[in-house]
Amino acid sequence: MGEAAPNVSEWSDQDPAVPVERLALKLLAAREHSRLELERKLRARGFDGGLVAVVIERLARAGAIDEARMAEHYVSERAGKGFGPLRIRAELGERGLAEDLFGPYLSAMEGRWPDYLGAAHDRRFGADPPLDRSDYAKRGRFLERRGFPADMIRRYLRWKD
């Protein structure tokens, strides 16, 4: 993230692609984006779809857009913030990434998901077990919204009892 954006412009200053590329590079300097995210943001700012597609393809060829790198970073960051594999998978799908790009990163963390679930639980509720069935259900709903599988949640909460 701290790296300088690559100089990828082949266009002259009069070319209409220059402002599109500058904004795209500014967005990419702030954080990784998928092609779809970048396209949505650029088109929302009024740039022509054809021009946006050309710029995005050029940036991807130059290595400024790397969806695999984005997926790896996103999975790690969201898991560290207490989100589970189901939610992360859905979020990456909404960002236009294919399962084959992020699936390996989710799978690589397979044995660590219970630890992430426990950390998310304890940050929200503390280390004490649920007080009653209502509290158990409340905790389960929270963890489910965070994107953890129901069977993992049940195992964790029963272990806490």
Image: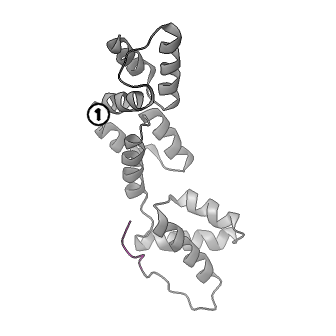
Q: Is residue 114 left or right of residue 36?
A: left
Query: Would residue 158 appear left or right of 51 to someone viewing this image?
Result: left
Residue type, mark 1 in image: Arg
70 relative to 138, above or below: below
Of 12 and 91, the residue lying toward us: 91
Count of number-bearing discs: 1
Given the current orientation, which residue lies at the most extreme right position?
A: 46
Q: Say which quadrant the C terminus sits in.
A: top left
Q: Is residue 111 magenta?
A: no
Q: Considering the numbered disc 1 on the image, is that residue within a helix, a strand or a loop? A: helix
State the residue at coordinates (47%, 13%): 136
Residue 2 among those drawn in magenta: yes
Q: What kind of secondary structure does the magenta stretch mostly adopt? A: loop
- Horizontal and vertical percent position of residue 40: 63, 60
Write down the residue under mark 1.
Answer: 112
In which quarter of the view is residue 69 placed? bottom left
Q: Which residues are magenta?
A: 1-6
> Is 116 on the left or on the right of 29, as rendered?
left
Q: Nearer the viewer, residue 137 or 113?
A: 137
Residue 37: x and y, percent?
57, 57
Residue 132 in the image, given as x and y percentages of width and height = 47, 8
- Residue 104 pos. (x, y %): 33, 43
